[in-house]
Every structure is written in C-alpha cells, then in structure tokens.
Amino acid sequence: MAWARLLLAREGIRAEEEATQVVRSAVYAQDPEAGAYFADLFHLPLLAPHRPLEGVVVELGRDLLQ
C-alpha cells in the first residue's frame, strides 16, 4: 500500500485508504475517462461498479503479490 500512496501523492491525488479483503485487484468507476486514467496508472482492469459510487475506487489485492 505504501507504493500506491506514494504514486498517488506524486500525481497530486488525494486518496482515502480502507483496509479490506480483496480477492482481485481492479479499478471501479462510473466515469469511464477517470476510470481509464487510474486503470492505466496502476495497470489494472477497469470494471463497472455494481452500485453507484462517487469518484474512483482502486482495489489492491493479494493477487499483486503473486
């Protein structure tokens, strides 16, 4: 998570962190343009969220360690 915080800070992006169990890393966004930016930044797939959300959610899971 530390590298993600540093990457976002370097991009000038304010982020909120929440610890949870994530099976597969992905980016979720209602706004396709914003979602594509973060998906490219983290090299993750962009998925449509199951429920409305504000902003962009980047989920980093254990799959990144494999």
Image (cartoon, grey):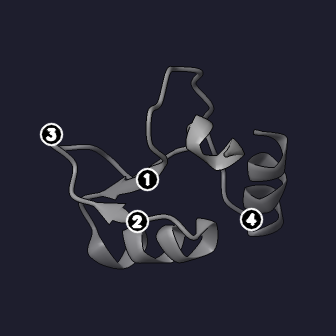
Q: Residues within 10 Å of mark 1 (few under 14, many from 20)?
A: some
C-alpha span from label 2 to label 3: 18 Å
Structural distance between the alpha carbons of marks 2 and 4:
22 Å
> For mark 3, does the 10 Å Cα neighbourhood hold few (<14), some (14 to 19), or many (20 or more) residues?
few
Nearer to me, 52 or 20: 20
- Quarter of the image for residue 36 reads bottom left
- Marks 1 and 4, the one that precedes in the sequence: 4
Judge from the rendering whether residue 8 lies leftward or rightward of residue 26; answer left or right. Answer: right
> The N terminus lies in which quarter of the figure?
top right
Which residue, given by chain and number where applicable, does mark 1 sit on?
Answer: 26
Asked whether 20 or 63 is in front, the reply is: 63
Residue type at mark 1: give it. Answer: Ala
Q: Nearer the viewer, residue 23 or 48?
A: 23
Q: Earlier in the sequence, mark 2 or mark 1?
A: 1
Q: Residues within 10 Å of mark 4 (few under 14, many from 20)?
A: few
Q: Which mark is residue 12?
A: 4
Residue bearing the label numbered 2:
45
Q: Are marks 2 and 1 in contact (CB under 8 Å)?
A: yes
